[in-house]
Image: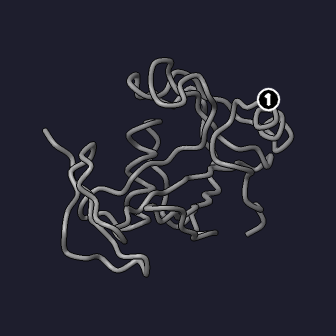
Amino acid sequence: MPEYCDIYDIDRNKTGRLHERGKPDMKEGDCLLVVFVWITNSDDEFLISKRVEGIWRGGMWQTTGGIAIAGDNSLSAALRETKEELGITLAQENGRLVKKYSEGANLFDVWLFHQEVDISDVVLQPEETCAVMWASREKIEQLSDEGNFISGEPPQTRR
């Protein structure tokens, strides 16, 4: 079954048109909303997951995230992607939008959630993720320096 995304203009306004994922029918100036979700615990560690081999950037570590589907707003996309990829239900009151930027045809929103998560409660999406760990800022920087981490450095964690 096809998956559709709302198309936005560069000013983050929905155009009223939809894009079928995987099809090259985007027009000049059309944008899609993409979310990144950083989850941190009381030890100032970040929950990261490893992508399965054989997919885009397979074998690399990442934060949770993805493209907002039709009807999503930024927060609902962040909550949905986390549930899909990790089986975790985030409490929306634990999160805040910490950064917005655009790059090419993508509008990016970066969310930071402060929430304790027991690794044993994580349910990986086998088509996308194969491992999960709590990582310090230093560990993420090391993975990034080695070319094994997607999505830049973690945001500041102070509330």
Residue plotted at (73% across, 69% down): 159
Relative depth, front residue between 105 and 1 = 105
Q: Name the spot of residue 34 as percent of width and height, x first.
A: 45, 57
Picture quadrant where residue 101 is located: bottom right
Helix, strand or loop under label 1: loop
Residue plotted at (24% across, 64% down): 71
Position of residue 64 relative to residue 125, above or below, is below
Position of residue 150 relative to residue 92, above or below, is above
Q: Name the spot of residue 43 as percent of width and height, x first.
A: 80, 46
Relative depth, front residue between 105 and 141 = 105
Q: Is residue 121 left or right of residue 19?
A: right
Picture quadrant where residue 132 is located: top right
Position of residue 104 relative to residue 148, above or below, is below
Residue that badge 1 annotates: 146
Q: Name the spot of residue 23 as percent of width and height, x first.
A: 24, 46
Q: Quadrant of the N terminus?
A: top left
Position of residue 49 relative to residue 111, above or below, is above
